[in-house]
Image: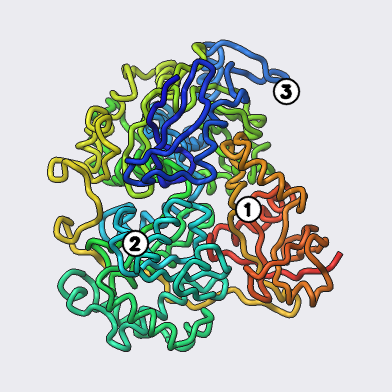
Amino acid sequence: MDYKPGICTFCGTGCGHFLKVSQSGVDGVFPSRNHPVSRGRLCVRGWNIHELLSTTDRNTTPMVKKSGTFQPVTYEEAITEAVNSLKKFLPGETAFLASPRSSNEENYLFMKMARSVFGTNNISTDTESGHRNSLDVLNEGTGFPGMTGSIGDIQKSEVLLVAGMDITRQNPIIGSELHMASMNGATLVTLDSRTTQIARLSDTFYRINPGSMKVLFNALASAMVANNLYDKSFVEKNTENYNEFIESIQAVDIESGAKKSGLTVEELTRLAELLTKSKSAMSFFTSGISGLDRDTIGSIYNVFLLAGKIGKEGCGVNPIAGINNLQGSFDTGCAPDLLTGFQSLADQKVRTKFESAWQQALPADGGFDFDTMMKNGSVKALVVTDHDDGIIKYRDSLDSVEYIVYIGAFRNDFQDYAHVVLPITSYIETDGTYTNTERRVQLSSKKMDGDANVMPGWKLLQTIANKAGANWNYTSPSDVMNEISQLTPTYSGITYDRLSTSFGLQWPCNTSKPDGTIRYSLESAPRKPLFVKISMDTDIPSVTDKFPYLLMMGKAQHYWHQNNLMHKTHIPLREYNATLLLYPDGYVEIHPDDAKKLGVRDRWSVRVVSAGGDMEIMAKVSDEVAPGRAYIPYFIRDMITAFLSKHIDAVEKGEDATIPVRIEKV
């Protein structure tokens, strides 16, 4: 029996663990005491990852659908069928959907194959689109497209602000860091529309009105300027375009913004004083499927820049990734307008560099993301790798896609839509790197042999590319990382040799930062940070006589994203099933006062009606929501998923998404 070090692949925290590996498989998991992120801890999901790795519910044989039924074939037959069929479609009709769970090496090759082999820039990572909003804001403001702080800085910060994120459930280890810092003297503040677990653990909790986060932060910035509560010397010395921003923010009505958000002017002023007068402060918000929109993230960033809390120890604006390699999927260019390291596809010099390295001309026009293509119906051929079941939200549109190739280690419902299924090994059966939410690139070395007949992902992608006419000659994932490093300035100092003797390196890692970069620093930044341009509109969702409740959406702890990992790990799945014993089709949370008004009790059926549809569901009576508000978790059974699919425009607004509804007793 052997204990092999590795990293957890549930969420974006990137905790360290040891897997108990034997001839029969993976028998257990233990936390790594020395790991700088998790420091001897694992969450309920991380403690059970060995169950996923031991599941027999694996793809082990290539399959081709014939007459509506999957038939087992050889890799050669399946790959030939897939390549020949994909080449029948125009590049603009073909979409490649990358996985935020795939390694950096697999995502890079997937992106390279889409562009250099099949000639399309229609490559994206659909899941957790909120992270792109975060990276765009931070890149515009600082030129640093990632978390500007570090998990290790949490214990060095005086003020910790959580904006609309139930972080103790979504990223429990980071949540525990925040709680620990609070117990050690830091001031923990939470802004949310629900009374979450982190809200209960906070020193101060402001329950804000749904959909008002941007309005609140813009009013906060206005209060800081009006009351001279911003760090004027920092702003004038270290930032650009501040006069333009200050002029625009002065037009925001503080009293109106406070009222719309549910706070008083006095509370806004106290928060402004807390942020500016402290020596250090950090903000945290989800960048996931319920992430904030671009303007709201921009408003948070602007407030922290105004307070002088960016670019210093214990400071930073920190989007928290919900999936393990979400940051890495963008770092490796899995976006229609980006190449690796957030290098713009539109930049001719960048494109020429890649064309020279790949010996292949690249399409110059930016492509479209998967969501856009599914909406406009332009997808005719689709290649998907190792994706979560959340893609099933497009079930009504998937039938219109003429050809689908699915690449994945584990079986899931999505592959039933595919025409070809290509198995790959799991992440412990091959080498690969993963980049966590704090930009830490970590090596996950091979820990056991998988099925001898199943290819690792990097090798399968090379085989597909070469069948389609390429001439790739990688001999290992290390070769792929070497190419990534050569083409990516932020990764240029990263090699497998260096990663194998450390707990990872935080990019930028290059000749000037050979040991990586703990946080964005004003001293080493190539330019001064900018205030980002955002909309100053103050519209927020409101109720009507016909629809007197605001329905909010988010995640549930144990059934998180309805993904393969949760399907196949028994204890989290058991907790979900226990929830379904009480609420078989999911639930809608309502306040006890509203339950009394409606004449219902916990677990009684209610009908939720909106302008776009309705669903019958059980009520969960809870004081986590305020009167006049309601809440449902994402992806609980088909009923809620079907209801939300009729409100995609609202859902895409992320954390601030709300739907005006009425609730009726059944």
Cβ atoms under marks 2 and 3 closer than 8 Å: no
User: In percent of the image, x 59 and y 24: which residue is there?
Assistant: 58
Q: Amino acid at mark 2?
A: Val
Task: Determine whether, in the image, residue 310 is placed left or right of residue 252.
Answer: left
- Rounded to the nearest angstrom, the CA distance separating label 1 from label 3 is 31 Å
- Spot occupied by residue 371 in the image (x, y as percentages of width and height): 54, 47
- Spot occupied by residue 554 in the image (x, y as percentages of width and height): 59, 58
* Relative height, residue 318 to residue 89 (above, below): below
SS class of the residue under badge 1?
A: loop
Q: In the drawing, what numbered circle is on residue 317?
A: 2
Q: Is residue 139 visible?
A: no
Task: Determine whether, in the image, residue 567 is placed left or right of residue 220.
Answer: right
SS class of the residue under badge 2?
A: strand
Sequence-wise first label, 2 or 3: 3
- Spot occupied by residue 307 in the image (x, y as percentages of width and height): 28, 74
Q: Residue 409's image quarter? A: top right
Task: Determine whether, in the image, residue 133 is placed left or right of residue 361.
Answer: right
At label 1, counting other C-alpha atoms closer than 10 Å, the crowd grade (few under 14, some 14-19, many 20 or more) is: many
SS class of the residue under badge 3?
A: loop
Sequence-wise first label, 1 or 3: 3
Sequence-wise first label, 2 or 1: 2
Q: Amino acid at mark 3?
A: Gly
- Rounded to the nearest angstrom, the CA distance separating label 2 from label 3 is 50 Å
- Residue in front for this viewpoint, 483 or 665: 665
Q: In the drawing, what numbered circle is on residue 68?
A: 3
Q: In the drawing, what numbered circle is on residue 634?
A: 1
Tell me the quarter of the image containing the C terminus. bottom right
- Rounded to the nearest angstrom, the CA distance separating label 2 from label 1 is 26 Å
- Residue in front for this viewpoint, 162 or 611: 162
